[in-house]
Amino acid sequence: MQFEVSRLRRAIMPLSLVCVTLLSACGGSDDDDDEAVTPTPPVVTEPTPVDPKPVETGAWTAGDLHVHTYQSDDAQVSLESALDQAFDRYKLDWAAISNHLRLSGRDHTGTALAGGPVPFSTGMAQYEVPFIKTAQAAGRYAGKIIFSSFEWDMPTHDHVNIGIGVNDPMSAKSLQAVAEFEYLFTNRDPALFDPLLVSRLAGQTRAFTTHADSLAALKWLRDKHPDSYMLLNHPSRYAGKYTVAQLREMNDLAPDVFFAIEGMVGNQMEPDRGGYATAYTNAFLPNRTYGGVDYLVAHLGGTWDALLGEGRRIWTVADSDFHFRTASGLYSSGYAPGEYAKTHVWKDGKDMASVVAGLKSGRVFGVFGDLIDALDFQAKGAGGAVHMGGELKAAKGERVEVTIRFRSPDSNNYEYPIESGNPTYVKPTVNHVDLIVGEVGARAAAGTPGYDADTNPTTRVLARFTRADWTVDAQGYNVIKTTVTADKSQYLRLRGTNLGVDVAGETAAGEPLPDAKVDLADNVARFNAVNARNYNDLWFYSNPVFVTVAQ
């Protein structure tokens, strides 16, 4: 405003001087000796430029990191069918094919290989990748991101998904790296590989037996292919496969490679949810799923919370582990990519590298049955605002505003009967959302008792919100606002469900109960019962926001 007033004054001033002169000449003053005084020009103050608010780029996308096809010996679906379902039917934005890193006796169509089984890296190079490239070059799956990864039988442990070459996907260099990994870290017969590759790697130790060999493979990825990732699949499916100390060890060794856990596991169409079929006894409760979620993540104050309580950036995701829905009228396995489980990632870019960057950032949430299809979770203080995966620096005692915005779609993909293609158009509805808090302390050192600690006793449900606690904004989002006091360093995370807090066989005091086996003799009846079980028990899990208080 001062700028505008100054301009007006400058415009008026010459006219005033003219009027003074005219009045003097016409007898307007009797004091002929007075000299005209020229006023001091006003100081013109230009406005201070205001830096424009940074424009956030990127968008939410949905995808799946764990999809099998015929090239896995236990799968019953073609590559084309898997991609059609992922992108055309269930509208995913990206997907990673992750066939087993084993011998493969079929091509991507299910046709038996005339020369007998080959290392999967060979099948990836000869069948999987050429099909993807040809299809996309012809305009199929336009705008979609397809990545070729693999599932490795980690020595002494269980399965991990490995993606190599995300910055240069499906290139000859990346495919060569997959072949090198398979040669070095499996017990495949050298005669099955390119003699030039065997000769080039002759001086390197092959490692495929011990936990130390697992670490050697992780170190190889870190050093040779730092743009790779290693995802821990269905971690608690079998008893004794991992200790929390081993998880810390792997994260310490390669934090930019080992940064994610498949907490919301796939194979949800199995009678034992996720294929978690260990004996149903109290001793094996940690080897159950809870609302379809691995115990490692589902257990409040458990292993995941213990890792987060050290400030570790280890995130949870949701995958399909798709092999087939039903087969031979006898078996059921899992849902198609995007049908039931989704990982939502904030992505800034149009390639797989941007997907992985989004995953590493932690701005990620997982969901079953499209309970929600959008989530904005942030903490705001004097130091600014941060999203999932971010860290807010706060003064001790500072009030931090927490905003939760979520939305549910008009319907999900529940169909009856299963495989009928008849949607029921059921609208998923969130019953409540839990805001969970846990304290963050120093990282435990290897060899100390803390390195073996698999609980975080400070973790608790800070607040439980129901429909009475949220409003609906103009965009149709349910909005919750609350405040927390930054009295100590802590993390905040969310989980939500369609269930009430005390539902027989499902929840107790808001906590998920272990999933029971669906054991019906009639196969079709069992398929439909499993499907109904899954869609009646829906959850979402966010990744955390960290609030760090200076000591």
Image: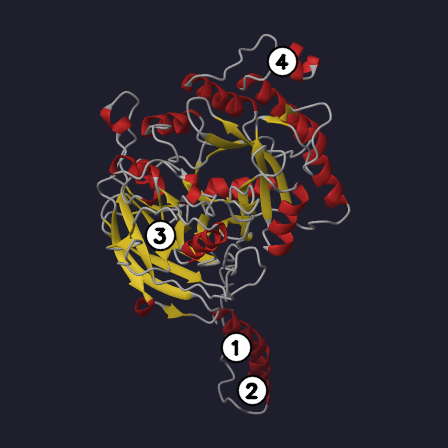
Do tag 4 and tag 2 residues touch (Cβ < 8 Å)? no
Do tag 1 and tag 2 residues touch (Cβ < 8 Å)? yes
* First-in-chain label (3 vs 2): 2
* First-in-chain label (4 vs 2): 2
Do tag 4 and tag 1 residues touch (Cβ < 8 Å)? no
Q: Position of residue 220 (x, y in %)?
A: 52, 21
Identified at 35% across, 52% down, the residue is: 494
Q: Nearer the viewer, residue 322 or 58?
A: 322
Q: Position of residue 499 (x, y in %)?
A: 34, 59
* Cα distance in 3D space between marks 3 and 2: 81 Å
Amino acid under disc 3: Leu
Judging by the rendered image, the residue that carries numbered circle 3 is 494
* Cα distance in 3D space between marks 4 and 3: 48 Å
- Image quadrant in which you'd find residue 239: top left
- Quarter of the picture containing the C terminus is top left
Q: Nearer the viewer, residue 47 or 404?
A: 404
Identified at 65% across, 41% down, the residue is: 79
Helix, strand or loop status at disc 4: helix
Q: Is residue 365 left or right of residue 310?
A: right
Q: Kindly identify which numbered label has been placed on residue 190.
A: 4
